[in-house]
């Protein structure tokens, strides 16, 4: 049993490593893929700790212990990115992730810097116990939230979406019940070590396979639009308001990086919720950000297509209304399937004729 369990853990490590390599080589830097990469790092860390042991890992143990915190926190973030349209990470999400990471970070620094010698071993142990309790609370919250994300927006989904959610929820639920609730993370002394390793390896491999399947599915099956599934037909008033909003934004309001739905609503002399509802129901956009980004990306496309321009990608992002480079890159790739740099390169190839199958003599002949 021990050998089989270790083999399953090595399989999970290998699968996570393959994902990391694929994400890096394909430059698949969407929010979902980056968060999933974080989970894979955490899974590799925790599996190596279990397979090799602390003594074998040696001086790398503190770093791996901290990285292992991503296995729980980033799994929840992965489930959000899989099953939510607007999976933006704000301060509540960061607070939960910090609540999982900080106790382990403190523990490792306290041991490395000999805090026990400064504040006393008893005092340090008390602090560690309190922080471990906080970590357990936030970890449990993340697990519950991850399960809830799979239930988010269940009504009106397709059969294939239904199946992938069943697979995700059943494997994740089974893993939590077996490893966390029944076997207490492998801490039960009356269970043989071989059986413990087998159960841990089975749960890790099962979750790795099911979530990998969900991510592959999501790559080819974008989340069905919440507006298309739930929003009732727009009223005449909403259609009229949507036209006014479109006209105002098209005039250049989208170039303001601080533009929010409340700002637009004030300029239209309307309530925030009415503007949001009009954008979703009458224009078919999932949310306000997607609506604004459509104009910003179109503006950026025009700037990137100008082969005579030497403006940097950052300058183009800022000139198009984005506040920073990261959101611009993600939104642009989501809209075009290419990064801004790749899009510019394609436009340059089209303009020069290089790379489209023409010889150099044919290019200059034209």
Image (cartoon, helix red, strand yellow):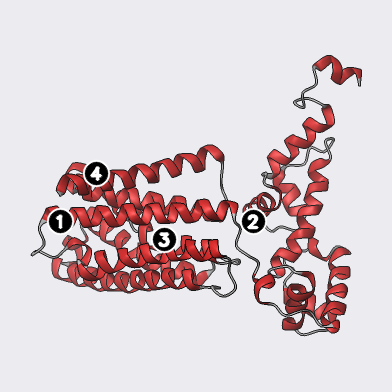
Mark 4 neighbour density, 10 Å: few (under 14) some (14–19) many (20 or more): some
**Alpha-carbon span between mark 4 and mark 2:** 40 Å
Secondary structure category for the residue under label 3: helix
Q: Secondary structure at mark 2?
A: helix
Along the viewing direction, whichever of 78 and 121 lies nearer the viewer: 78
Residue 231 shown left or right of residue 127 in the figure: right
Q: Is residue 310 above or below residue 202?
A: above
Query: Which residue was labeled with disc 3?
Result: 75
Task: Tell which tag, 4 or 3, sits nearer the viewer.
Answer: 4
Q: Which mark is residue 195?
A: 1
The residue at the point 78 percent across, 30 percent down is 349
Q: Earlier in the sequence, mark 4 or mark 2?
A: 4
Distance between mark 2 and mark 3 Cα atoms:
22 Å
Of the two numbered discs 4 and 3 on the same chain, state the one appearing first in sequence: 4
User: Does residue 45 lie above or below 175 as drawn?
Assistant: above
Which part of the image, by quadrant, shows the C terminus?
top right
Tags 2 and 3 in contact by the CB under 8 Å rule? no
Residue 112 image offset from top left, x and y in percent: 24, 53
- The residue pinned by badge 4 equals 7
Q: Position of residue 318 (x, y in %)?
A: 73, 53
Q: Nearer the viewer, mark 2 or mark 3?
A: 3
């Amino acid at each position: 049993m021990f050998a089989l369990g270790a083999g399953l853990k090595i399989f999970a490590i290998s699968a996570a490593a393959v994902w990391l390599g694929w994400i890096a080589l394909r430059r698949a830097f969407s929010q979902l893929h980056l968060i999933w990469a974080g989970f894979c790092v955490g899974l590799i860390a925790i599996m190596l700790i279990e397979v090799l042991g602390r003594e074998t890992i040696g001086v790398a143990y503190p770093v791996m212990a901290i990285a292992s915190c991503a296995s729980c926190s980033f799994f929840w973030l992965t489930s959000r990115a899989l099953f939510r349209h607007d999976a933006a990470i704000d301060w509540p999400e960061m607070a939960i992730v910090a609540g999982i990471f900080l106790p382990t970070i403190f523990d490792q620094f306290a041991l490395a810097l000999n805090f026990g010698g400064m504040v006393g071993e008893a005092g340090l142990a008390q602090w560690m116990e309190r922080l471990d309790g906080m970590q357990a609370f936030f970890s449990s919250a993340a697990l519950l939230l991850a399960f809830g994300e799979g239930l988010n927006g269940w009504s009106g989904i397709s059969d294939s979406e239904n199946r992938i959610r069943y697979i995700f929820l059943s494997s994740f639920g089974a893993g939590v019940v077996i490893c966390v609730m029944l076997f207490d993370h492998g801490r039960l002394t009356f269970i043989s070590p071989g059986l413990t390793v087998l159960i841990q390896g089975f749960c890790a491999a099962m979750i790795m396979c099911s979530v990998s399947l969900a991510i592959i599915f999501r790559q080819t099956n974008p989340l069905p639009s919440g507006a298309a599934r739930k929003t009732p037909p727009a009223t005449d008033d909403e259609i009229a308001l949507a036209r006014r909003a479109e006209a105002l934004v098209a005039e250049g309001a989208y170039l303001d990086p601080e533009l929010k739905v409340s700002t637009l609503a004030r300029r239209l002399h309307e309530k925030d919720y009415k503007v949001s509802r009009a954008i979703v129901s009458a224009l078919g956009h999932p949310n306000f950000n997607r609506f604004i980004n459509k104009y910003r990306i179109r503006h950026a496309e025009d700037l990137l297509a100008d082969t005579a321009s030497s403006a940097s990608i950052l300058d183009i992002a800022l000139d198009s209304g984005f506040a920073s480079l990261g959101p611009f890159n993600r939104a642009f790739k989501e809209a075009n399937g290419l990064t801004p740099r790749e899009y510019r390169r394609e436009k340059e190839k089209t303009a020069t004729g290089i790379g489209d199958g023409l010889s150099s003599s044919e290019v200059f002949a034209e």
